[in-house]
Image (spheres, rainbow, N blue to C red):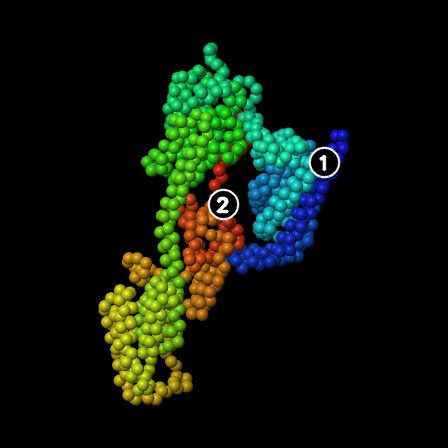
């Protein structure tokens, strides 16, 4: 029977191998097929000449030896598989690892990069691999199969791919680095889907149909008790509701059993301190009653002694009183299960006190809940596994508060007293009713909502300023374009040219900022500019001169109104009107201009119009508040704004024609993922999007560290993966975080003595 089962497992392992080989080969082939197109895109996107040269260098060998790379990858992956599944696999080093021990530093760095990619891929596929490691352990007959010994693991895939990259004989380490980047962009997602398919295949064949709660394995971890952790099928005849109802308590007990095993709790009594004569074993209601006395600050009434300073330490919250309790005679009087629970809670609070995401001031407050949490855990083991447990949800809400507090949060902060009152109410009143945790959590959620509202109010000023900056930039661009097209089309006297560029442009800017192109002020300013330009052009007929004389008073009135709105100095206005009067007087006074001015003689050169630079910022009276404001034009991002009007309009159209990202809205969360290897990822909230969607603002929970991006830049980063939209807030629940940290430490091998 055993031989039959072994044969069945071998056949299933072979079927899984064929599935993975086929899918991996197809994924690599698809990547190579698209490699030339991808590299061409990378070349066009980067301004770095060295990168452009490198990408161009990689195109030729990838094009010529694409099939060879695919074949080599398949061959080396099969070899990796055999090494991990045969009995004479030795130490499990790949051919490449062995050969690279005697080569240069560049090759060593390359190997490290491929190993880093394997680690990254394992993290990305953590959930699928955690289950697959256990199921493959069943097939190969090794319940303690280490993660890196899984023949389907990322380590095997990346070893095979690195060997395949060496099929490009004339390609150096840098080109192979480009190939690794191609793998990251095009194959990594496919690997996760492949792992899901293999898991589904094994489940269909009754290999661990359900994986129970456990620690995700990292390289070096052992899949302890994989077959023992396989969940049993619900009893036949029960409906789905009953099965689920029975499964939940079982899962909770399983987690506590796992914790017991990791902590090392066995049979017998607990704390590790010899009981003095007359001491009693505490359990059940007597134990909970004793803890309630300690919670209220009355340790003298306890049957077994505790350190005299324990009550003060519990009130301060900065010491792990559970660890102190464990080593006392009180802790020695606990039955094993309660002693183990105390040990687990003690380690959880150690992890909490070490958590860098929780400010020290808040750690001291949460630390006062050690005894109430111990009572909860002793009475109800579902505390460890049930996400909806009231006490656990309270801790998670404290985690939400933590990310909103500054690192220097102290007793002087206004929020401190509010939080202290909530915690003290629990310490003073908690007996058995878990409803006290629900009411405390509601109060904490109120603090969270109040904080978020305050941040919104404070950051509204930043958002408003960005919006105004956008309006002014659009207004400056519009005003410059209107002035520029006219001064390029007309030969204007120097005084008028200077007036339009230096003064009237600023009035157009303010008019546009206030009411846009459809506003009366804007239309009036444009008409006045056109009338001024007409007025200084030669008047060759009596009718034109009479029309000019009649229109001058209204024109002057319009210009005066505009200059007054700008707050222009009187001497500037008087100087300009003096020059304008001379020009008009000359036009009206000439009686001999009934004929058109003669055309310039052949070869005669006309004076060229001066080249005008509109790129410099201009200063205007702030249309949105007091004082003055310096205005720059639109940020075209991709390239400097051209100085010619057609080029500027094309650039602006290009800027505004970039479709805004449809999946980004205010309130969403994104993660910034810089391409630099040593750069940290940062999560940020979409704080504000300007009305015309030319600017996007991002910030952290506290409304600080604001990042401002143009529309083309955010679109580019979303396409390259430098910005990734998150499904929700990035914070891991506090309880999960400290639990996973504790489990990670428990799973790590003890340091050598």
Q: Quick one: which residue is furthest to the top in this view?
A: 277
Residue appearing at x 43%, y 67% in the figure: 648
- Foreground residue among 531 and 602: 531
Residue 141 vertical placement versus 38 (above, below): above
Q: Quarter of the image containing the N terminus? A: top right
Q: How crowded is mark 1: few (under 14 residues within 10 Å), some or many (20 or more)?
A: some
Q: Residues within 10 Å of mark 2 (few under 14, many from 20)?
A: few
Which comes before the other along the chain, label 2 or label 1? Answer: 1
166 with respect to 596 (left or right): right
| Res. 162 in view | no
The quadrant holding residue 157 is top right
- Foreground residue among 374 and 269: 374
| Res. 423 in view | yes
7 with respect to 611 (left or right): right
Report the residue marked by disc 2.
728
The quadrant holding residue 237 is top right
Residue 500 vertical placement versus 11 (above, below): below
Report the residue marked by disc 1.
9
Residue appearing at x 34%, y 89% in the figure: 595
| Local SS, label 2 | loop
- Residue 164 percent location from the top left of the image: 65, 48
Residue appearing at x 35%, y 61% in the figure: 631
Separation of marks 2 and 1 at Cα, in angstroms: 41 Å
| Local SS, label 1 | helix
Depth check, mark 2 against mark 1: the one in front is: 2
Q: Which mark is residue 463?
A: none
- Residue 495 percent location from the top left of the image: 30, 74
- Residue 323 percent location from the top left of the image: 46, 24
């Amino acid at each position: 029977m055993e031989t039959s089962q072994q044969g069945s497992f071998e056949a299933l392992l072979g079927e899984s191998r064929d599935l993975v080989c086929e899918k991996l080969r197809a994924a690599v082939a698809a990547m190579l097929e698209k490699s030339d197109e991808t590299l061409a895109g990378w070349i066009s996107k980067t301004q770095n000449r060295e990168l452009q040269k490198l990408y161009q260098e990689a195109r030729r060998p990838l094009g010529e030896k694409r099939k060879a790379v695919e074949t080599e990858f398949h061959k080396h992956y099969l070899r990796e598989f055999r090494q991990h599944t045969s009995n004479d696999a030795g130490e499990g080093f790949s051919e490449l690892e062995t050969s690279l021990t005697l080569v240069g530093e560049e090759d060593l760095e390359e190997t490290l990069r491929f190993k880093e990619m394997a680690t990254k891929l394992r993290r990305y596929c953590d959930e699928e691999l955690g289950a697959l490691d256990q199921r493959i352990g069943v097939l190969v007959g090794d319940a303690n199969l280490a993660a890196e010994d899984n023949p389907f693991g990322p380590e095997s895939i990346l070893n095979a791919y690195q060997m395949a990259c060496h099929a490009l004989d004339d390609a150096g380490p840098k080109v192979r680095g480009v190939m690794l980047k191609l793998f990251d962009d095009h194959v990594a997602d496919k690997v996760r889907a492949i792992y899901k398919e293999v898991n589904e295949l094994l489940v269909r064949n009754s290999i661990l149909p359900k994986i129970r709660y456990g620690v995700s394995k990292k390289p070096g971890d052992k899949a302890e008790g994989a077959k023992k952790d396989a969940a049993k099928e619900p009893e036949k005849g029960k409906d789905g509701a009953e099965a689920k109802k029975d499964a939940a308590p079982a899962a909770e007990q399983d987690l506590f059993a796992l914790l017991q095993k990791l902590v090392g709790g066995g049979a017998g009594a607990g704390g590790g301190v010899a009981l003095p004569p007359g001491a009693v074993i505490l359990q059940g209601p007597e134990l909970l009653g004793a803890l309630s006395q300690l919670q209220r600050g009355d340790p003298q009434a306890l049957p077994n002694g505790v350190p005299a300073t324990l009550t003060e330490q519990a009130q301060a919250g900065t010491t792990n009183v559970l660890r102190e309790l464990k080593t006392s005679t009180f802790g020695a009087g606990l039955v094993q299960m309660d002693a183990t629970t105390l040990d687990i809670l003690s380690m959880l609070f150690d992890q909490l006190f070490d958590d860098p995401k929780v400010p020290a001031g808040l750690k001291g407050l949460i630390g006062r809940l050690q005894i109430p949490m111990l009572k909860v855990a002793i009475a109800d083991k579902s505390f460890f596994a049930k996400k909806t447990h009231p006490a656990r949800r309270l801790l998670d809400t404290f985690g939400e508060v933590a990310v909103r507090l500054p690192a220097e949060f102290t007793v002087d902060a206004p929020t401190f007293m509010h939080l202290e009152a909530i915690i003290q109410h629990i310490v003073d009143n908690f007996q058995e009713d878990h409803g006290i945790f629900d009411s405390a959590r509601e109060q904490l959620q109120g603090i969270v909502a109040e904080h978020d509202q305050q941040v919104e109010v404070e950051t509204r000023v930043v958002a408003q300023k960005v919006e105004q900056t956008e309006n002014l930039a659009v207004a400056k661009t519009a005003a410059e374009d209107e002035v520029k097209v006219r001064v390029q089309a007309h030969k204007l006297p120097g005084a008028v040219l200077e007036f339009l560029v230096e003064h009237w442009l600023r009035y157009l800017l303010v008019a546009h900022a206030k009411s846009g192109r459809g506003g009366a002020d804007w239309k009036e300013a444009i008409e006045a500019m056109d009338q001024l330009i007409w007025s200084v052009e030669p008047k060759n007929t009596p009718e034109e001169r009479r029309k000019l004389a009649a229109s001058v008073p209204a024109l002057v009135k319009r210009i005066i109104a505009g200059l007054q709105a700008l707050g222009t100095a009187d001497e500037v206005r008087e100087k300009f009107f003096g020059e304008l009067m001379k020009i008009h007087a000359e036009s009206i006074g000439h009686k001999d201009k009934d004929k058109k001015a003669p055309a310039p003689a052949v070869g005669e050169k006309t004076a060229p119009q001066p080249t005008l630079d509109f790129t410099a910022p201009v200063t205007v009276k702030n249309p949105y508040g007091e004082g003055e404001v310096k205005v720059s034009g639109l940020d075209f991002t991709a390239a400097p704004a051209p100085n010619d009007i057609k080029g500027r309009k094309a650039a602006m159209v290009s800027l505004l024609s970039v479709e805004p990202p449809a999946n980004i809205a205010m309130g969403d969360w994104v993660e910034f993922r810089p391409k630099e290897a040593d750069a940290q990822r940062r999560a940020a909230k979409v704080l504000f999007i300007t009305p015309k969607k030319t600017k996007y603002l991002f910030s952290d929970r506290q409304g600080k560290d604001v990042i401002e991006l143009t529309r083309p830049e955010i679109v580019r980063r979303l396409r390259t993966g430098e910005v990734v939209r998150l499904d929700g807030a990035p914070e891991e629940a506090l309880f999960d975080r400290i639990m996973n940290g504790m489990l990670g430490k428990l799973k790590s091998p003890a340091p050598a003595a």
